[in-house]
Amino acid sequence: MMTTEQKFSKEELIQKSKEPGLKAMKMHPFYQGKMQVLPRCEVRSFDDFGVWYSPGVAAPCMDIYKNPEQVYVHTSKWNSVAVVSDGTRVLGLGDIGPQAGLPVMEGKALLFKYLGGVDATPLCVGPDMSAEDIIQLVKWIQPTYGGINLEDISKPKCFKVLDTLRKDPDVKIPVWHDDQQGTATVTVAGMLNAIKVVNKKKQDVRIVFNGVGASNFAIQRLLRTAGFDIRKAVFVDSKGILYKDRPDLKDSANYKYEIVQNSNPEQLQGLLPEALEGADVLISLSRPGPGVVKPEWVKKMVDQPIVFACANPVPEIFPWDAKEAGAVVVATGRSDFPNQVNNSIGFPGIFRGTLDVRATTITDEMCIAAAEELAYYAEERGIHAEYIVPTMDDSEVFIREAVAVGQMAIKQNIARIKLSQEEATAIAWKLITESRDATKLLMHEGFIPRYQE
């Protein structure tokens, strides 16, 4: 099988990696946004507005007033998600603010709709909103939405927002932080198959986590739940390796305190090069590269190492450089490289399944169910060094993922309605297929104009 590196020279690959950004600067102003609002109901004549609005609308209003759960029957709440961001940690761009973060949130909404059939609203807020402000905002808007997707919020604010909302008994809808739970889910799926490619076992591999932000914080927790031995892992932040006697990590209020108490058994000290000596796996979600991870450091890892370099928009090390240094499996967060370990194959299906059974939250067990289904799907098609997780082209995977998540929610007794696997499959298939077909129809009829290079 010809690899990506064999198809293109290194110079061509570098140029190819710049193409999405160049196209984005032309196509974004052409379309002036990626989402719009269209009717769900028929409008055969103006008489229909007497049903959809006054006076007819009073009847469903009073039905909801008497039985609040009827809001899922009479309105679009059942399929609506708010993508909430304050723009303080956008992709690899950092604190660029809510307006500059809006293109990302619109893109998120597009993925929600096209891949999962979910109606998502970009909701960029701020600037300078505290954790308490965002918590209150979510509580204020929850009557309208069936779920909340927190996005690109800096740490430790993001931890407080998510943890507080998930524990609040007055919050009746699922609240999810995609940078934590979504990234963790897809990374677990990739890891389950990556270790199979190199013929290693979960409990044997030593993992180095480069970056101890929201993503890696959640990844290590979910990997532990999935059976990986995180006690032998080593964590590295901007100051170096985390170890118990490091002066800034002795305060139990520091969110890294728990990690340092349950990892790095040899109490290694130093920087990333020292951490990587003898490691099986590198999971890096730190800052955009290239050059953040150097090939000579990868050479210090054990035979057949695995490298997940997932910073956006540019990975910490380019895949071809990691492979030249000996890495067997290399994953990034980019769709134009093999092995895209990216939330895009996670959150659309996970929310589809969550919404379909009206689950009250999204648990770690639901995330593991999604990760395992992603891994199974890829394995059925034949995993290898450049295919460890499905891609966005694998449309069936979102349906299977939705079903797995919904069934786990039912098993955990956190679903408002119960569906059989057959019923859940039919619902997910219908909604996802309709969303894609509607987009194609709008393009075919010219309501979405064609962009000409």
Image (cartoon, grey):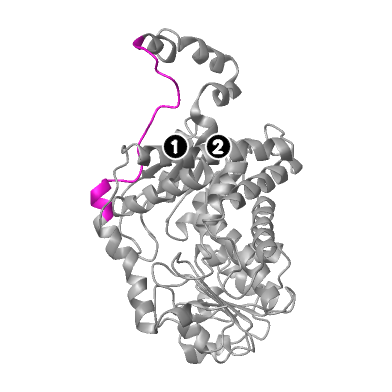
Residue drawn at (35%, 79%), measured in percent from left and top? 12
Residue 109 is left or right of residue 273, and the answer is left
**One can see residue 142 in this view:** yes
Q: Could you tell me the amino acid type at mark 2?
A: Leu
Residue 112: where, in percent of width, then height?
48, 46
Indicate yes or no whether the magenta region holds residue 149: no
Residue drawn at (35%, 37%), measured in percent from left and top? 36
Residue carrying label 2: 431
Circle 1 or circle 2, nearest the eye? 1
* Helix, strand or loop at mark 1: helix
Indicate yes or no whether the magenta region holds residue 44: yes
Residue 360 is left or right of residue 330, and the answer is right
Residue drawn at (64%, 77%), measured in percent from left and top? 233
Which image quadrant: the C terminus?
A: bottom left
Residue 37: where, in percent of width, then height?
37, 33
Mark nearer the N terminus (1 vs 2): 2
Q: CA distance from mark 1 to mark 2?
A: 11 Å
Give neighbour class at mark 1: few <14, some 14-19, many 20+ (Cα, 10 Å): few
Work out whether residue 238 or residue 359 is closer to the camera in this orientation and state it. 359
The number of callouts visible is 2
Residue 230: where, in percent of width, then height?
68, 72
Instruction: Read off the magenta span.
Output: 27-46
Residue 269: where, in percent of width, then height?
56, 87
Residue carrying label 1: 438
Q: Which mark is residue 111?
A: none
* Helix, strand or loop at mark 2: helix
Relative to 443, is 386 above or below? below
